[in-house]
Amino acid sequence: MEMRIDAMVKDADHKFQFDDSIENAIEILKEAYFLSDKSNYTVGIISSANLLGNGYLYHSDFPNATSKFYISLRHAETLNDSSSMSKSYRGLGLVKYNMKQWAEAISDFNKSMDYKTAPLDDRLTSVMDYLLGLAYYNLGKYEVAETFLFSAREAAESVNDSMRLLEIRLNLNHIAVERSNSPEVLSIYDALYTEFEHRNEKIGMCYSVLGKAKSLLKSGDYKKASKLALTSLEMARSAKMKYPLQEILEVAIETEYQSGNYKASADLMLEAQEIKESTLSQATSTQVAMMSADYDFEKKEEQFNDELRAKNKQRLMLLVLVIALFIISIVVYLSLRGVAKERHRSDELLYNILPVETAKELKANGVAVAKAHAEVTIVFADVQNFTKIAGDLEPTILVQLLDFYFGKFDAIIQKHGLEKIKTIGDAYMFVSGLNEATKDNASNAVSAGIDMLQAIRESEAEIMSRFGAHFNFRIGMHTGRTVSGVVGKIKYAFDIWGDSVNIAARMEQNSEPGKINISEDTYSLVKDAYTCTPRGHIDVKNKGSMEMYFVEDRKA
């Protein structure tokens, strides 16, 4: 069995040299790990787990990579196998490096060097020094970073690793930007881009453009910097490169803001926040994976010792079996409870995105059929002079302001039992009457609009004290025929369509701050319940002349 496992690990290690064989290598290693674990072959566990960690790292599966490197480390400790311990720490350092946990990565890399039993060859030296140099660069320790990068360059030159030398030149130029930002760095970035392009190295091309954008940003050429940052962002997206995306977004946010493109800056900030939350989630998962691996190792070690002691003690063997069954029962119970909890959570998220009936239909059938509605009241609320106000605010303040108001609106439409459709920049859209067409639907929409304006007025003092600015909203609504449905396959989006939506948008555009402007169709449904002021016929883009009314208040 042991010879078979060793042969499988050797075969998988060879397959890792070729991109099109990596999936096959991972499957072989999974079987080798299973057989090693089943037969308590510690050497096989160490070697298969270490290579499996590399496979998971290739796919950016950081929790599983962490688990396998840590399992390899713990078993290597039992044999005092310094060489394998060095490899395991190097793997853990690579996981943390890819998750941008620079200080933790440096710590693991140093531990890997402490446990090495033989001098590193020049190729591995260039890799380790290069990674340490980049980690120190990202920590802002440029002098230390340069020392490691120079060492990596010397090692790479000795083995003629031209690709590594290109990457080192790129990062030394990054450091030059941080230190002096002389004009020469721009021409160096251009030369590097050409060389990376010749090799079809997308990441190198992307970082060359980004480095040039950062240099121009630092020198105050915001327009050019913005164009380059967005080019780098498009390159990363089209090549589906996750690793540089957060850094690119940070530069793009700053360049767009400095160029006066405040809305674009805010949109990019929201995208960056999603990536940060995803990274935080992965960091939590890696911690859980390590704890789980630690628990499994200790449980397995304890079980092994129990079996040794129980060879001549039948009753102890039975006791161990009962304990094992009990633990398995608890694990199964907790797993099932966890699955149920996650299912409930996913249901809540789905109901938060889609109307309840649509969500149930989607869960039951996998698709949701579009529906026609004879009479729905569509409402738009929009910030007056948003573009001018946004130009005077920091992006973070702008997003916090919108979040404050939209949070108030969410609570109001939930109170009235209405359906939020979406937010579009500074606009908030909801509808009344999707599930049932009655006269009260229009009245409920108007009532919600009045509550929204009241909430805005009551919050003005609080908003001014917290943010130094506030928004004035204008509201418009129209009642008519629409079609609703779900679009998209990856991220579901519920929306409504029809000419009535366009008319509602025109009602909002012709409204005034602090006012609710309604169409004649909506007026005919609410005139008995609300005092309204006729505005006469007003020309509407692409619609001609339309009768409009301002809602003043509820009738006694």
Image (cartoon, rainbow, N blue to C red):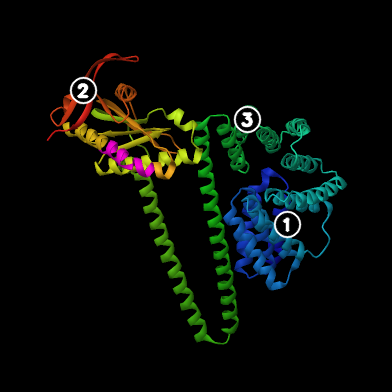
**Disc number lying in front (1 or 3):** 3
Numbered disc 2: secondary structure: helix
The magenta region covers 451-463
Quarter of the image with the N terminus is bottom right
In the picture, residue 176 is in which quadrant?
Answer: top right
The location of residue 412, given as percent across then percent down, is 28, 42
The residue located at (32%, 23%) in the rendering is 498
The location of residue 350, given as percent across then percent down, is 37, 45
Quick check: can you spot residue 420? yes
Asked if the magenta segment contains residue 415, the reply would be no
Q: Which residue is mark 3?
A: 222
549 to the left or right of 170: left
Asked if the magenta segment contains residue 453, the reply would be yes
Q: Disc number at residue 521?
A: 2
Q: Hey, which residue is sitting farthest right in the picture?
A: 158
Q: Nearer the viewer, residue 98 or 123?
A: 98
The residue located at (61%, 51%) in the rendering is 99
Question: Is residue 161 placed above or below 216 in the rendered structure?
Answer: below
Quick check: can you spot residue 365? no
Q: Earlier in the sequence, mark 1 or mark 3?
A: 1
Q: Amino acid at mark 2?
A: Asp
Question: Is residue 173 placed above or below 88 in the rendered structure?
Answer: above
Numbered disc 1: secondary structure: helix
Numbered disc 3: secondary structure: helix
Task: Provide the major secondary structure of the magenta segment.
Answer: helix
Q: Amino acid at mark 3?
A: Tyr
Q: Amino acid at mark 1?
A: Lys
The residue located at (62%, 44%) in the rendering is 243
451 to the left or right of 265: left
Q: Earlier in the sequence, mark 3 or mark 2?
A: 3
Task: Say few, some or many: other residues with alpha carbon within 10 Å of mark 3 (under 14 / 14 to 19 / 20 or more).
Answer: many
Task: Say few, some or many: other residues with alpha carbon within 10 Å of mark 2 (under 14 / 14 to 19 / 20 or more).
Answer: some
